[in-house]
Image: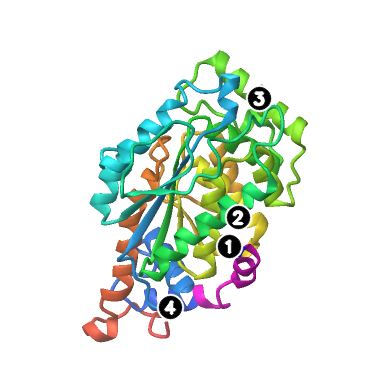
Amino acid sequence: MLARLRSAITAPPAGGLADGQRHLDSLTKPPGSLGRLEELAARLAGLAGGAPRVERPHIFTFAADHGVVAEGVSAYPQIVTAQMVENFLRGGAAVNVLARQAGARVVVADFGVASPIGSSPELVACAIAPGTANLARGPAMTHAQALQALETGARLAEQALDAGADLLATGEMGIGNTTAASAIAAAITGALPERVTGRGTGVDDATLARKVDVVRRALAVNLPDARDGLDVLAKVGGFEIAGLVGVILAGAARRVPVVLDGFISGAAALVAVTLAPDARHALFASHRSAEPGHAVILDHLGLTPYLDLALRLGEGTGAALFIHLARAAALIWREMATFKSAGVSQSEGASGR
């Protein structure tokens, strides 16, 4: 499946962005006056190969636990992962509230939660194992587990796409997963652990120093190959992160926009682009997280976020907020009158555009 996805991911046709900008310049406004909303509309249209739509967005909130919590890197106990999954299923988390406002469906999946979760028809049960191993002392998972998690995420995304999803958004939950994301970011970007490791759940100075040391040890013990995304995933990743890599690759293969949430989703995107460089054309950075490593990730991917609200919750919350902008950009493209259709005079020198 991974081979199929990688072979299907190609860059959009050359000239698509320029064609999109010409259409936007024909609308009843001074060229460029809608700022980055025009950039967003042009990118959506270039990806779609025509008029974009954002009518059936899906947010994928994947959950899993991490053995690295044994190193004392989080302010919260591991049981919180399962408790928050149950909160998602009841519709009481921030991502649920924001998704309802955005008209998005939230897909909640258990990729490897260590504690029991109450049964619910809304839960996708696809656990690879009850949490990863401790990445500070050896590989987080096997190569086979990394591939299984990735392909499971891709299958969930393809099911949504087959049912009509026109925008995929990434979200996650997992106590300890900012440590895994920091290790991924350091491994792939080459940045020092202290530059990409932040406070996550709000840890104090002593815990932050310990967390940086854990990331440094994980890299030294595992020696992940930055050129091989699966190797990085297996050695220092998480099951939910691997699942999100699959979502990204599936969306890119179908030329559907994939909206990245924050730091953890960004780490998944680093892996996805390592596996399929042209996947970057489908990526939209919803916001800039308060986690310091997120700016490093965005710079490496060449993405400029559309929102900067100091968010650091995860779940898919920033991606949910971005859906409103994407929908607005698509509607501008589709519904705004042109100078010709509205009988409005263009500025001098613009008639040839």
Q: Callout 4, which amino acid?
A: Arg
The tag on residue 22 is 4
Identify which residue, 92 or 317, lies in the foreground: 92
Nearer the camera: disc 4 or disc 3: 3
Q: CA distance from mark 4 to mark 2?
A: 31 Å
Nearer the camera: disc 1 or disc 3: 3
- Colour theme: rainbow
Q: Say whether residue 189 is visible.
A: no
Q: Callout 2, which amino acid?
A: Ala
Do the CB atoms of the residues marked 4 and 3 lie less than 8 Å apart? no
Q: CA distance from mark 4 to mark 3?
A: 51 Å
SS state under label 1: helix
SS state under label 2: helix
Judging by the rendered image, the residue that carries numbered circle 3 is 214
The tag on residue 279 is 1
Residue 180: quadrant of the picture: top right
Q: CA distance from mark 2 to mark 1?
A: 7 Å
Q: Is residue 236 left or right of residue 349?
A: right
Judging by the rendered image, the residue that carries numbered circle 2 is 272
Quarter of the rendering occupied by the N terminus: bottom right
Residue 39: quadrant of the picture: bottom left
Q: Is residue 225 left or right of residue 198?
A: right
Magenta range: 2-17
Of callouts 2 and 1, which one flags the residue occurring earlier in the amino acid sequence? Answer: 2
Do the CB atoms of the residues marked 2 and 3 lie less than 8 Å apart? no
Do the CB atoms of the residues marked 2 and 1 lie less than 8 Å apart? yes
Of callouts 1 and 3, which one flags the residue occurring earlier in the amino acid sequence? Answer: 3
Identify which residue, 8 or 51, lies in the foreground: 8
Q: Callout 3, which amino acid?
A: Val
Identify which residue, 146 or 293, lies in the foreground: 146
